[in-house]
Image (tube, rainbow, N blue to C red):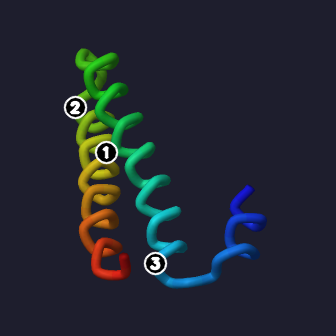
Amino acid sequence: MLNIQTMMDKSPSHIAEMLITGSTMGTIDAIKNIKKYKDAEPSILELMNDLKKFEENNIEQLKAFL
């Protein structure tokens, strides 16, 4: 699917939009899993929080290309 979308529109704005969409999905999954597994080991929750922050940072940096 990604290849088809990039073949049709290779602009930085479109690629940034696709990456933001993916990072948003990753952020949502991270939040859901943090809530679902709130009793997990602290190191696991910390890792998931780090992933969430990473995805959120990606979104912020990619906004410049829209």
**Mark 1 crowdedness (10 Å alpha carbons): few <14, some 14-19, many ≥20:** few
Pinpoint residue 64: horizontal percent, then vertical percent: 29, 80
The answer to whether residue 58 is above or below residue 32 is below
The residue that mark 3 highlights is 13
The answer to whether residue 54 is above or below residue 37 is below
Amino acid type, residue under disc 2 in the picture = Pro
Q: Secondary structure at mark 1?
A: helix
Pinpoint residue 29: horizontal percent, then vertical percent: 41, 34
Which of the marked residues, 3 or 2, is nearer the chain's N terminus?
Answer: 3
- Label 2 near label 3: C-beta < 8 Å? no
The residue that mark 1 highlights is 47
Q: Secondary structure at mark 2?
A: helix
Q: In terms of depth relative to the viewer, which is nearer, 38 or 56?
A: 56
Amino acid type, residue under disc 1 in the picture = Leu
Which of the marked residues, 2 or 1, is nearer the chain's N terminus?
Answer: 2
Q: Which mark is residue 42?
A: 2
Pinpoint residue 65: horizontal percent, then vertical percent: 36, 81
Amino acid type, residue under disc 3 in the picture = Ser
- Label 1 near label 2: C-beta < 8 Å? no
Of badges 2 and 1, nearer the viewer stands: 1
The answer to whether residue 7 is above or below residue 34 is below
Which of the marked residues, 3 or 1, is nearer the chain's N terminus?
Answer: 3
**Mark 3 crowdedness (10 Å alpha carbons): few <14, some 14-19, many ≥20:** some
Q: Quadrant of residue 33?
A: top left
Q: Secondary structure at mark 3?
A: helix
How far is mark 3 from mark 2, CA to CA? 38 Å
Q: Residue at x 53, y 73 (%)?
A: 15
